[in-house]
Amino acid sequence: MKTHESVSLKYGDADIDIDVSKATSVFFLKGKVLLPITDLKTTFKEAVTAKTVDSKPLDQLLNSKDLVTIVVSDITRFWMRQDLICRELIDFLHSQSQIPYENMVIVVALGTHRGHSEEEQKKVVGEYVYNRVKVLNHDATADDLVFMGTTRQGTDVWVNALAVNRKVILIGGTVHHLMAGFGGGRKSILPGISGKKTIEQNHLLCLDKNLPKSSTAIGSGALSGNPVHEDMMEAAAMVNPLFSINIISTPEGRHSHIICGHWEKAWLKSCETVHDSFSVPIEEKADIVIASCGGYPKDINLYQGIKTLLNMSLAVKPGGTMIFIAQCREGGGSPDFFDWRIPLKDGVLDEKLRESFTIAGYIFYAGMEAISKGNVLMLTSFSQDLNEEALKDMNISAYCDINELLSHVDFTDKSVYVMPYGGNALPQHHTA
């Protein structure tokens, strides 16, 4: 049944229109409508007091002499607007628990990402907070990391010294995650404030132990039996954070839910909310899937955009067409992302990733697995590293003009799925 003549999707700061009038069917895949919070101060206070999950109210867990470490995500996850939450939190700690600002420290959970500049530090916590509380970059190679123990998977857990013998509060955004099942929660500890070796040991669990592919136990929404997630949970339990603040955002970037309390139980409740909100059941896969990352900043680079590519690959028929809308004004987005083209062309991508695992390497690897499911045509703006040749090596046909791209697509009698916020909608294909 025909439902749309054309569709409009976000591309950077602009909108692009695609004529789908010749298609047999056109359906949108998007999560439930989430209502934005209108009174953040009141909602936050209720979330950390009257509505905590499996925890006493936050003010009853602390006293004025406590040393508090607040762990926040880095600039790549600023879409969750944690700066607004940080302000509410330090005001609450200062006024309700009488904790002096000098007893608080904020650690930015960089994992193995580069350190922030002073301006970026101000941005992730907000200038109000930055002027009152010390903000520090986590350093995964620091010589004062503390050894906490070894997980059942054999991961040696080294963490930031400020997470030891202090009251630790986690602030994170809960989303579907391609490796860990869901982001946020325990990821603030591992990889967030863990050592480089710890992170590499954990993330190697993404790969199948015997075959050159990703483990079938990992993936968006997968927690039970997921070795990456379970390993992260063990590491976080060694730190045993006092409290967690879990943010759920609308696709447009507004706060929708703040779920607080026990570091594990509150986060798991936020995972249930995310899965219920953003999982989209489909009865069958489509001939053509059109997906946008959702415009800037969600399509700032290909590293971030891969999540959309992974999700759309779950909805396309084998060998079908994927139209991938991602401006990528900052190119690949990670210094070593396109370096993995070399082992790809040499036919040793899996071998080299196992030898020298990096997050960007696995994002590239997972992207190649998604691309193999169909024919990918990408609308993008070329840059020095993200150019036609680099994308061709990845089996992506790239165009900077939508009309040129569409000249290679025949919608006649085809079924089409449209994903306006591709990174937020997780297609769930159920077979009889």
Image: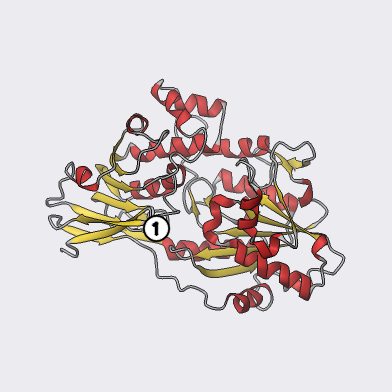
Q: In which quarter of the image is the N terminus?
A: bottom left
| Secondary structure state at the residue bearing disc 1 | loop
Q: Is residue 201 above or below residue 239?
A: above
Q: Is residue 432 above or below residue 249?
A: above
- One can see residue 332 in this view: yes
Residue neighbourhood size for the residue with mark 1, other residues' Cα within 10 Å, grouped as few (<14), some (14–19), many (≥20): many
Q: Mark 1 points at which residue?
A: 425
Q: Which residue is drawn at 44% across and 65% down?
A: 277
Q: Residue at x 39, y 37 (%)?
A: 383
Residue 373's quadrant in the figure? top left
Tally of numbered discs = 1
Camera-side residue of 34 and 338: 338
Residue 427 in the image: x percent, y percent?
36, 55
Residue 221 in the image: x percent, y percent?
48, 54
Question: Please, what is the three-letter code of the amino acid marked with disc 1?
Answer: Ala
Q: Which residue is drawn at 56% across and 32% down?
A: 357
Horizontal side of residue 166 vs 235, given as left or right:
right
Q: In this view, does 371 lie above or below 284?
A: above
Q: In which quarter of the image is the C terminus?
A: bottom left
Camera-side residue of 95 and 284: 95
Residue 291 in the image: x percent, y percent?
32, 52
Q: Residue at x 56, y 34 (%)?
A: 358
Structure colour scheme: secondary structure
Residue 152's quadrant in the figure? top right
Q: In this view, does 321 lie above or below 260?
A: above
Horizontal side of residue 158 vs 336, given as left or right:
right
- One can see residue 54 in this view: no
Residue 232 in the image: x percent, y percent?
63, 47
Horizontal side of residue 354 vs 48, given as left or right:
left
